[in-house]
Image: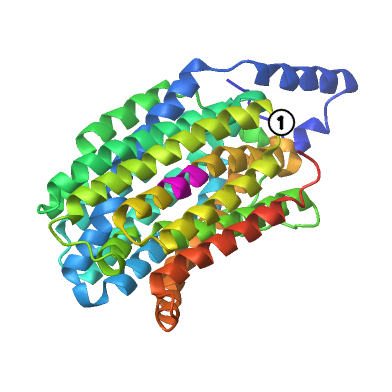
Amino acid sequence: MIPPAASPQTVSTHSDSAQAEDTATEEAAPQKVSKRNVAAILMTTFAVSFATLMPAMVALPIIVARVSPENKESGLGIALGITSFLGMLLAPIFGAISDRTTLRLGMRRPFLIVGPCITVAGLVTLGLADSLAAVYVAVVTMAVGSGIAGAADGAMIPDSIPDRLRGRVLGFSTVTGVSAGLIASVVGPQFIDNQFLLATATLPLSIPLMAIGLWLYRDRVLDPKDVPQQPIFRTVLRSYRFSPKSAPDFAWVWLGRFFVTFGIAFAASFSIYFLTDQLKVSKAELPSLIAINSMLSLGGTTLGTIVGAFVTDRVRSRRNLVLVSALLLATGGLIVAFSPNVPIFLIGSGLLFFAIGLFIPTDGVLVMSVLPGGGKSDVAKYMSLVVIADQLPRSIGPMIAPAVIALGALTSLGGYPVLYLTAGVVAILGGVLVRRVRSVN
């Protein structure tokens, strides 16, 4: 386990010899990888993904369409937007608080306990929802839980894993999450007629797995002397403060992720409606196609993640890989946009999700490589600020998408093709912006 980083106040009081000793310790510590922490990261990732991906991929669009069939596009867009907006709003706050948590339980584990408990309450509420208002209450509850847990979860790899292995650990963590989603995508359609099980069937496995992962995790324990003494309100305000001039590479990576994720938000949120409205898939065919498309998409993400995980650790051409990911995403969106039938749609969807998988570890390691302060302090804060780049487009993207679809419907291309084409253009812009990073490859 990596020892807690010393605060600037403490460092300034050390003698030169003590500073040299601390530096040597900090350089040596990252070479040791805690197998317990790697196992904990993989288990908690599987638990969270298994609990939440089935509602996101299957339950939410099905339930929204059931309770409000006339307004399903806008209803789904608002539900997804609420989830992303609250996650974006809360993650930096709880990230900054996590960086200053001095409990004996650790800096991260308290948030990884409270957050999932709140998420479970949201899933139960979603399973019982009989109106759009109830759906919104459920997604708000789930978003609060995800925001609390995500703030600590984002710091686990920078806390525990050295740079030379982060791509692989992040990649396999992603594959673990995708595998959970793959299982959920097979299980989910089996409960399409039972709303409560559709939302909660994964909990009997995900809850004990989360508990075991938290027991395994060797968390950092922060010395109260290393915590700046300031009111909690100031800590909350400081959680959002960042000057791009002080760390331009972090700012460019943040902006690049924003635009690539914006493209992903457009391309990945309305596939069920594309099948029913654009390709005229019947209600009887829909459950099997949801499962096939989900498995293909998750399989593409897995393959892309594995490729990205090993390439980014060995070649380290992370900026180029981000641009390649964006170009592949645009190509997949182009294929989907002009797909005349379901098989071509599935090919485009698979390529699109391969690109998403390639992007995840590549961009994730790139973020960790440009953290302000060298990733020695405020890790959860800056990783949570990256959550804004990830969640803000997921928040406003689904809300804007119905307008893009409506405008596209006025053209000869049609609404959904225009949406997928727009996704590709926006993603390429993000890939180009990441090329402005100078301190790393």
Q: Is residue 186 visible?
A: yes
> Among all residues in the image, which is located at the extreme bottom?
410
Which quadrant of the rendered structure holds the C terminus?
Answer: top right
Q: Image point 37% across, 50% down: which residue?
A: 145
Q: Picture coordinates of residue 182 (x, y %)?
A: 31, 38
Quarter of the rendering containing residue 166: top right
Q: Image point 65% across, 60% down: which residue?
A: 429
**Tag 1's secondary structure?**
loop
Q: Image point 45% across, 75% down: which residue?
A: 404
The residue that label 1 is drawn on is 6
Question: Is 203 located above or below residue 242 in the figure?
Answer: above
Q: Considering depth in this image, is 258 or 315 the residue closer to the camera?
A: 315
Question: Is 34 located above or below residue 330 in the figure?
Answer: above
Q: Considering depth in this image, is 415 or 31 the residue closer to the camera?
A: 415
Which region shows up in magenta?
350-356
> Among all residues in the image, which is located at the extreme front?
340
Task: Give the prevailing secondary structure in the magenta stretch.
Answer: helix
